[in-house]
Amino acid sequence: MIELRHLQTGFDGRVVSRDLSLRLEKGRLLTLIGPNGCGKTTLLRTLARALPARGGEILLDGQPLQSYRRRALALHVAYLPQSREVPDITAEALIAHGRFPHLGFSRRLSERDRIAVEDAIHLAGADGLRHKSLKTLSGGERQRVYLAMVIAQETGLVLLDEPGTYLDIGSRFEVMEIARRLCARGAAVVMTLHDLADAMAFSDRICLMDAEGVIRCDGSPGQVYDSGLLEQVFGVAVQRVTLPEGQTQYCFLPRHV
């Protein structure tokens, strides 16, 4: 679906990451982790074509990403940035914006579009928010609405930049569960996270980048833990804990503890 071959990213004349090679798989949740400034957001923006690649190539269904027209690309790739303006419209109106790449010349929602919007509202758990103004919603409620808009876009690749930022722990978990539901529907979901415990708990696959923007490890959470590179890259101690229910959790502590 999406393949990165020796990709180089950057902006404002500065190279951020070099020689990035990855394959993004349908139905899997891949999380990019790494220190501040390592290029996680820059990589997402490059995948969304908000920034041009500085070298290498990105293939979408075997074709160069830059060969797609903007509207055609929006039928394949949805991108939710970390920071967004908050328009004074209802939640339902914003969610319907996700259907714009699918609309004909009339720019009116068809019955198929309305079904997709309703499905997205339900999947994101935003039924009680549809008639409320975005400006009146809490951070967690607003994020749920923006995720519903992404779901309504019905793309095979979903890019989420720090979707849990500024949210309390319960809202963060809800956002992670929505991302998992998207994967269950067959989408490839790629997100950046600063919260390492969330990344290790919810992801199918972890891509660990170092401060130089180089991929140091790419594998399951267990494989990344076993590599010992989390301690090296972040300068922390990591403990793997098996809960009585059999679930595996990862605890991050100051190295001296």
Image: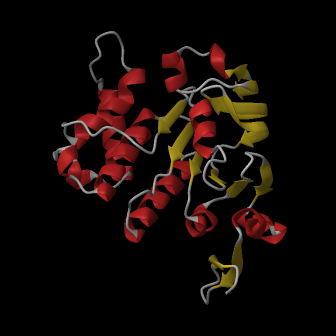
Q: Is residue 173 above or below residue 28?
A: below
Quarter residue 120 falls in? top left
Residue ranking furthest to the front: 13
Q: Position of residue 105 (x, y in %)?
A: 33, 9
- The quadrant of the image that shows the C terminus is bottom right
Residue 187 in view, yes or no: no
Residue drawn at (24%, 40%) of the image? 92
Left or right: 223, with 167 as reference point = right
Task: Point out residue 192 in the picture as x, y percentages from the top left corner.
Answer: 57, 51
Quadrant containing the N terminus is: top right
Residue in the picture at 83% in, 67% down: 227
Kindly give the residue lying farthest to the bottom in the view shown. Answer: 244
Depth check: give the residue in front, 123 or 227: 227
- Left or right relative to 68: residue 161: left
Can see residue 163? Answer: yes
Residue 166: image quadrant is bottom left
Count of marks placed on residues = 0
Q: Is residue 53 above or below residue 233?
A: above
Quick one: 97 or 235, which is closer to the camera?
Answer: 235
Point 64% across, 66% down: residue: 200
Towards the viewer: 104 or 66: 66
Q: Where in the figure is residue 176, as x and y percent of width and height?
A: 49, 59
The image quadrant that residue 158 belongs to is: top right
Q: Residue furthest top?
A: 105
Residue 108 placement (x, y as % from top left): 26, 19
The relative height of residue 131 versus residue 226 in the rendered view (above or below) is above
Q: Residue at x 76, y 32 (%)?
A: 7
